[in-house]
Amino acid sequence: MTALQHFIESHPRLFVLTGAGCSTDSGIPDYRDRDGEWKRAPPVTLQAFMHELATRQRYWARSMTGWPRFGCATPNTAHYALAQLEHRGQIELLVTQNVDRLHQRAGSKRVIDLHGRLDEVRCMACDWRQPRDAFQRLLIECNPAWQHLDAAIAPDGDADLEGHDFTQFDIPSCPHCGGIMKPDVVFFGEGVPRERVDAATQAWRVANAVLVVGSSLMVYSGYRFVQAAAKAGKPVAALTLGRTRADALLSLKIDAPCSDALAFVLASERLIAN
């Protein structure tokens, strides 16, 4: 922890990349085990979602069940610590692979949601958008018999809902054009918007170090920034549990829960206030 504190204090312009491990203390499960392997079946792909009604029915039924818990998740110590570092002027940009918006709720403002945000849905035909809470009400209106089902929350904000006939689940269409409604997140097989990648690239180039928080970096969309920064000679530290794809590139590796390891940031702030 002393090494992590020294790394943060020695690099006043940090490029921060966060992943699912940053939100586990908020009650949102992560995707991978300590070896970087999937804990469950990989998330749905864009191709399956767009071309298979059965996939969409299963996805939205599980999402309707999981959303109440996911939508009520609150920031934890790691989120607040990173927001405090930004407040001190130490973070050039925070790029998160998470879709929960907990960094923003904790007070971070310089944030790129690399993979989008789950609290909005959009039409894949006309790009009409709607808050996820409003779409939840439509889902309940169309499927009242599913409203009181309960299941453990899953990493994508859905739930481990099994043993049901999803063919009976009714999905609301876009009210403007009748198109397919999808959460405003990047599914597997879907490209990250170019403007997000460009903004993140510009930020790591002017930063003087990279800090990875809660990510195994197994997904290329986030790993590419770490790989490029390390190749450019930037020091890279990772705070996460288990193996990462970038272990050979790291200047510092802290194998610990994110909230525990970053608690010193808030503790030091309280000392300054006193």
Image (spheres, helix red, strand yellow):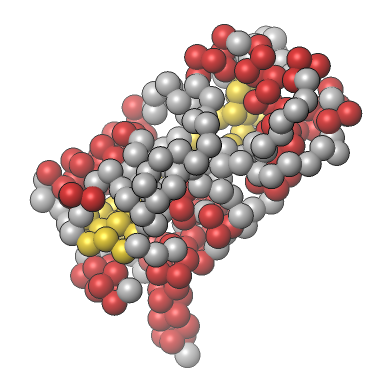
Describe residue 37's horizontal placement relative to residue 174 as left or right: left
Q: Is residue 3 above or below residue 197?
A: below
Q: Can residue 3 be seen? A: yes
Describe residue 212's horizontal placement relative to residue 246 as left or right: right
Q: Residue at x 11, y 45 (%)?
A: 232
What is the x, y in percent for residue 73?
Answer: 64, 53
Q: Is residue 169 above or below residue 111?
A: above
Q: Residue at x 28, y 43 (%)?
A: 245
* Quadrant of image for the N terminus: bottom left
What is the x, y in percent for residue 4?
Answer: 29, 69
Return the residue nearer the eye: 42 or 60: 42
Q: Quadrant of residue 165?
A: top right
Q: Residue at x 57, y 17 (%)?
A: 49
Return the residue nearer the eye: 254 or 225: 254
Q: Is residue 64 above or below residue 231?
A: above
Residue farthest to the right? 145
Return the residue nearer the eye: 96 or 220: 220
What is the x, y in percent for residue 64?
Answer: 73, 33
